């Protein structure tokens, strides 16, 4: 129980610190009134707009208002859409979640087999080729790869659509595109583009895990018993190699959601990343702050859950924390 309370206190401190940094950082940039009001407006209209937005108050008072609203689930009202910022983000979140899940799935399906092969044959031509290709996933800019995908598969070949989410189906009040043929076609290119970096990461993690596990005594013992190589790999090696891969992917999922901005912008995917870019352009401060705070909450929650799973799987973690 002490371990859980300690982690909850740490998470609360992180959220509080990030709330201050995010709010001060965002509200210290520019003046949204200059972008939202007509240049021909008189001084009375400008002052009325400033008062309506609450920008006439000192920054510390604005922050206290923000904190009070946040504790009640209100992160402000959008200057542009005149709707609660949280509602705008939650309306766009399913599209980003769908894209992130598709990207993670692609990274797992492609990255783990390639990483295992590279780990089993580290000095072979295939193993070296896989590792060389994985470097491209780390090196190539996401926006450039996205534009190349559009140029090749959408413009020249005409195989896949380049923008939008396509046809969607509503399930439990949430719209999903992967359940329709048109929606799935729209999902392929942005999902692959977003998955490139994570696929390279999974390949390297799987390779390192494979090399480490294959040197263990229980693997040598399994081979000495005469078990076939596929059985040794699939039954004894794979499940142990997957532990660090799953752990890192759990933490990386938050970054996929948070940093899908570039991919959503390139492919005009209607997720929270595209909403963020639009909000930055128009200095829609409440939406920017709400996005950043919800992103912080996502990262903190994922890290907390991973810590709890670690503590359950390995009691030494709890004992060390209590010592």
Image (cartoon, rainbow, N blue to C red):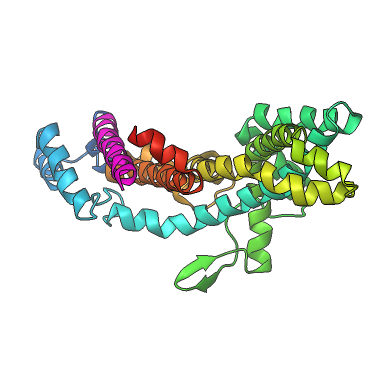
Residue 155 in magenta stretch: no
Q: Is residue 296 left or right of residue 211?
A: left
Residue 262 at x, y percent in the picture: 54, 39
User: Which residue is drawn at the image coordinates 63% and 30% (left, top)?
Assistant: 141
Q: Is residue 238 left or right of residue 86?
A: right
Q: Quadrant of residue 173?
A: bottom left
Q: Quadrant of the C terminus?
A: top left
Depth check, front residue: 67 or 125: 125
User: Which residue is drawn at the image coordinates 77% and 45% (left, top)?
Assistant: 113
User: Which residue is drawn at the image coordinates 25% and 49% (left, top)?
Assistant: 75
Depth check, front residue: 3 or 217: 217
The secondary structure that most of the magenta stretch takes on is helix
Q: Is residue 167 left or right of residue 295?
A: right
Can residue 259 be seen from the camera position used here? yes
Residue 251 at x, y percent in the picture: 51, 41
Q: Quadrant of residue 210?
A: top right
Q: Is residue 12 left or right of residue 236?
A: left
96 up-or-down from 124: above or below: below
Residue 286 at x, y percent in the picture: 27, 45
Q: Which residues are magenta?
A: 1-26
Can residue 194 be seen from the camera position used here? no
Residue 110 at x, y percent in the picture: 74, 46
């Amino acid at each position: 129980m002490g371990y859980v309370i300690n982690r909850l206190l740490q998470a609360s401190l992180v959220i509080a610190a990030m709330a201050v940094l995010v709010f001060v950082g965002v509200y210290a940039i520019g003046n949204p009134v200059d972008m939202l009001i007509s240049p021909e407006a008189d001084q009375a209209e400008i002052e009325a707009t400033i008062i309506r937005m609450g920008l006439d108050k000192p920054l510390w008072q604005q922050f206290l208002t923000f904190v009070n609203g946040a504790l009640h689930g209100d992160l402000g009202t959008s200057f542009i859409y005149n709707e609660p910022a949280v509602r705008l983000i939650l309306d766009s979140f399913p599209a980003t979640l769908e894209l992130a899940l598709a990207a993670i799935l692609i990274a797992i399906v492609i990255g783990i087999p390639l990483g295992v092969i590279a780990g089993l044959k580290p000095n072979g031509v295939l193993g070296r080729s896989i590792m060389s290709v994985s470097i491209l996933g780390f090196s190539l800019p996401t926006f450039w790869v996205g534009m190349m995908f559009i140029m090749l598969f959408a413009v020249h070949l005409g195989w896949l659509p380049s923008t939008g989410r396509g046809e969607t189906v509503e399930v439990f009040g949430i719209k999903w595109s992967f359940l329709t043929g048109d929606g799935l076609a729209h999902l392929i290119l942005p999902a692959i583009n977003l998955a490139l970096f994570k696929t390279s990461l999974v390949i390297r993690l799987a390779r390192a895990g494979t090399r480490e596990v294959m040197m263990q005594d229980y693997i040598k013992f399994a081979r000495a018993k005469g078990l076939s190589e596929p059985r040794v790999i699939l039954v004894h090696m794979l499940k142990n190699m997957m532990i660090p891969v799953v752990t890192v992917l759990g933490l990386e999922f938050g970054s996929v959601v948070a940093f899908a901005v570039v991919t959503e912008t390139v492919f005009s995917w209607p997720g929270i990343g595209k909403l963020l870019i639009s909000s930055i352009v128009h200095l829609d401060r409440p939406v920017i702050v709400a996005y950043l705070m919800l992103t912080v909450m996502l990262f903190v929650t994922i890290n907390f859950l991973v810590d709890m799973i670690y503590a359950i799987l390995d009691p030494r973690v709890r004992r060390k924390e209590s010592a």
